[in-house]
């Protein structure tokens, strides 16, 4: 047993990994003859340079936080909810259905669209859960399959029954009626998505306390740590797994309904915006801890929305933002493992040196 | 008819390399979940290098190295660092997608090198079969070899038996004197190199050129086909040709049903889920106990130790 690492030992690999990721990004930029520092400045400017941009960044932050909050629940139950993308899509489709067919004022339609998102995303996640608990279909591959089925369903709706009059293009359905648009708040010379921001904050705070301060959360984490021992202790494992799927899917579904009624105002094939898979990166980086979700998600949306400026101003492919996001998580994950490995290796070498002074060739 | 079958064979060829590679990797007990990223990255690298070097073979070689590098990271992270294979593979998938888009941006729309057409002399003269099987190029013939070699290796050789051992019961294999982790390194990297070939096969032959959507979702589809094929090389190959047929059908029916080309490629995913449901369903278990041959024909379970870390203690 090694002594539990100090705060510095625990966080320094993360700090080093983030620094390495940025150095790597600078190297990539330098490789293609782009000025790295200017690029970093442009990203910041693109994300927060004006109130309009800050508002757009926050609008992108909302679905990422919602999806990530849901993923924190499923991850803590030991589940790899790769199906999150599909859950966002199904939430968006359900919200779009409400927006398309239900008449009425905004005050009724918006809550209804959110409830529809909860149902759409929740049921789609529950399907992955039933496949796992009842049919022993691993949630990673079941979820991946359901992602594509949901994406196919969205495409089918866009080019089929919900196609625009006269054309069958994949650019999306007709815009929803004005009454279904998420209301915004005017301030500082632009409009802000205040309601979505509040919903995202409530979700992430709710998940934090659910996992930290409730018996349900405690048991859920027990199931995540060891399903067998949790089961032997009398916890109905499957019911907890299904609940985790339901909560995670519901939050992803709300993210989808936000994409539909607060952002696109129509159904498009790529309605999920990739926020589900990006959310998995956020949660991995957050170490499955809800309290880091909001800041990390803000950092990631800053990189994502800011990178579009690189496209406009420097003519760079905006995928550089995705590269940096992927790198940070990759280096943090690998860096954490590497730090532990190096520590254990040096510890065991020291131990061996004591036990086997002759140093007989014991291969590692 | 001949032309249609021939186009199915060549459309499926890259997928054959990718799925055979992943089958080998997963048989050894490691999941390389990075396929969507490593396939796309190697397709981009293959195109760019072949374009610059004006040489297709160099493109293939570098793509193999790229695929092997992704796999090596997963093997190292899993075997040495004891990290979750799914986590590392998933992050690498997204990372590879982004890196390919970014680095390949300047090469979109360029006309590059292509694998030269080479009908096999003599064999291509055979009526029907000659047109369908032997009027392609080296990449396509290589995909036949990949299937046959994978099958032969798994079921007809001693190292193949050991490979199944380290994926099913690593402790037992270790007790029999097999260096489990060394073999896992080897098969994971070999599988990754084959994924690299698949990437090059897209950008240098089947879809010729580079754009972000060149291999869109084909990496995930390859993962689904490996499962649908129950980790058996011949059934996995069948899955590839079945998917190739769907692709060709969608293309040919495009004028009649315009949406079909978007929706048909999704077919492998529900099929994968159904295959997984069938494998573990109790009625199938009873049936296959009674008819063991039927089990081999229709479905088989995942390698017992898939995705786990082996520690000798």
Image (cartoon, rainbow, N blue to C red):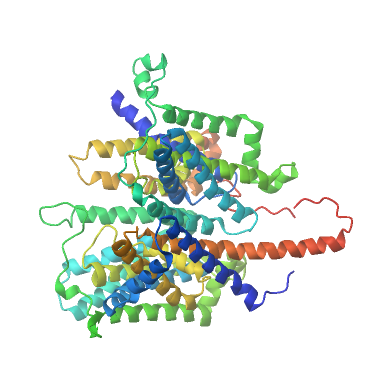
What residue is at 46 percent from the left and 62 percent from the top?
A25
Where B182 falls versus B153 (above or below)?
below
Whether residue B236 is visible here, answered yes or no, is no
Depth order, front residue of B122/B306: B122
Relative to B228, does residue B136 appear above or below in the rendering?
A: above
Is residue B272 rendered to the left or right of residue A222?
left
Residue at the image position 31 percent from the left and 55 percent from the top: A151
Residue B163 horizontal/vertical position (percent): 63, 40
> Which residue is at the front of the view, A198 or A140?
A198
Rendered location of residue B209, percent (x, y):
34, 41
Answer with the quarter of the image where residue A83 lies.
Answer: bottom left
Residue A55 on image: x %, y % = 29, 77
Query: Between B10 and A187, which is closer to the camera in this rendering?
Result: A187
Q: Is residue B250 above or below residue B143?
A: below
Which residue is farthest right? A358
Position of residue A352 in the picture relative to residue A261 (left or right): right
| Residue appearing at x 34%, y 64% in the figure | A310
Q: Is residue B215 left or right of residue B161?
A: left
Residue B295 visible within the image = yes
């Amino acid at each position: 047993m090694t002594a539990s690492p100090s705060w510095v030992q625990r966080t320094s690999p993360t700090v080093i990994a983030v620094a390495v990721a940025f150095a790597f990004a600078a190297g990539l930029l330098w490789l293609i003859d782009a000025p790295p520092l200017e690029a970093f400045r442009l990203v910041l400017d693109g994300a927060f340079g004006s109130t309009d941009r800050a508002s757009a960044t926050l609008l992108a932050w909302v679905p990422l936080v919602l999806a990530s909050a849901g993923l924190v629940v499923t991850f803590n139950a030991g589940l790899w909810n790769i199906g999150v993308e599909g859950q966002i899509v199904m939430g968006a489709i359900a919200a779009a259905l409400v927006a398309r067919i239900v008449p009425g004022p905004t005050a009724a339609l918006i809550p209804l669209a959110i409830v529809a998102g909860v149902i759409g995303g929740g049921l789609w996640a529950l399907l992955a859960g039933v496949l796992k608990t009842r049919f022993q279909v691993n949630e990673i591959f079941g979820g991946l399959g359901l992602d594509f089925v949901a994406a196919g369903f969205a495409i089918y709706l866009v080019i089929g029954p919900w196609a625009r009059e006269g054309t069958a293009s994949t650019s999306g359905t007709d815009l929803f009626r004005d009454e279904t648009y998420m209301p915004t708040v005017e301030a500082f010379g632009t409009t802000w998505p205040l309601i979505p921001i509040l919903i995202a904050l409530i979700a992430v705070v709710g998940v934090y306390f659910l996992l930290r301060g409730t018996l349900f959360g405690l048991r859920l984490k027990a199931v995540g740590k060891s399903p067998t021992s949790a089961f032997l202790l009398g916890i109905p494992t499957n019911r907890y797994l299904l609940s985790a799927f339901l909560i995670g899917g519901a939050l992803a579904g709300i993210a989808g309904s936000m994409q539909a009624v607060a952002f696109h105002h129509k159904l498009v094939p790529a309605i999920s915006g990739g926020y589900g898979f990006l959310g998995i990166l956020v949660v991995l980086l957050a170490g499955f801890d809800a309290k880091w979700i909001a800041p990390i998600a803000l950092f990631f949306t800053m990189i994502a929305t800011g990178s579009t400026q690189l496209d406009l101003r420097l003519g760079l492919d905006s995928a550089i933002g995705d590269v940096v996001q992927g790198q940070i998580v990759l280096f943090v994950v690998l860096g954490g493992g590497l730090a532990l490995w190096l520590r254990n290796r040096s510890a065991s070498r020291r131990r061996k040196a004591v036990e086997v002074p002759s140093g007989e060739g014991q291969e590692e | 008819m001949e032309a249609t079958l021939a186009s199915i064979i060549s459309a499926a060829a890259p997928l054959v390399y990718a799925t055979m590679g992943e089958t080998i990797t997963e048989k050894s007990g490691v999941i390389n979940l990075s396929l969507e990223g490593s396939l796309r990255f190697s397709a981009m690298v293959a195109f760019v290098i072949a374009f610059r070097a004006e040489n297709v073979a160099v493109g293939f070689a570098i793509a193999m190295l790229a695929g092997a590098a992704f796999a090596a990271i997963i093997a190292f992270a899993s075997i040495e660092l004891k990290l979750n294979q799914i986590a590392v593979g998933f992050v690498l998938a997204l990372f590879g997608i982004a890196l390919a888009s970014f680095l390949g941006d300047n090469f979109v729309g360029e006309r590059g090198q292509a694998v030269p057409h080479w009908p096999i002399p003599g064999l291509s003269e055979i009526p029907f079969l000659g047109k369908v099987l032997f009027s392609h190029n080296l990449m396509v013939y290589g995909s036949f070899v990949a299937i046959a070699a994978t099958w032969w290796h798994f079921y007809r050789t001693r190292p193949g038996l050991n490979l199944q051992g380290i994926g099913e019961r690593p402790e037992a294999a270790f007790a029999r004197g097999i260096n489990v982790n060394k073999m896992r390194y080897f098969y994971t990297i070999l599988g990754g190199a084959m994924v690299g070939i698949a990437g090059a096969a897209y950008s240098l032959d089947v879809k010729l050129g580079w754009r972000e959507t060149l291999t869109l979702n084909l990496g995930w589809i390859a993962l689904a086909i490996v499962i649908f094929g129950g980790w058996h090389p011949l059934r996995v190959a069948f899955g590839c040709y079945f998917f190739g047929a769907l692709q060709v059908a969608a293309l040919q029916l495009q004028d009649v049903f315009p949406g079909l080309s978007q929706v048909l490629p999704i077919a492998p995913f529900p099929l994968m889920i159904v295959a997984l449901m069938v494998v573990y369903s109790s009625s199938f278990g009873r049936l296959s106990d009674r008819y063991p041959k039927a089990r081999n024909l229709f479905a088989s379970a995942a390698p017992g130790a898939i995705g786990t870390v082996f520690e000798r203690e």
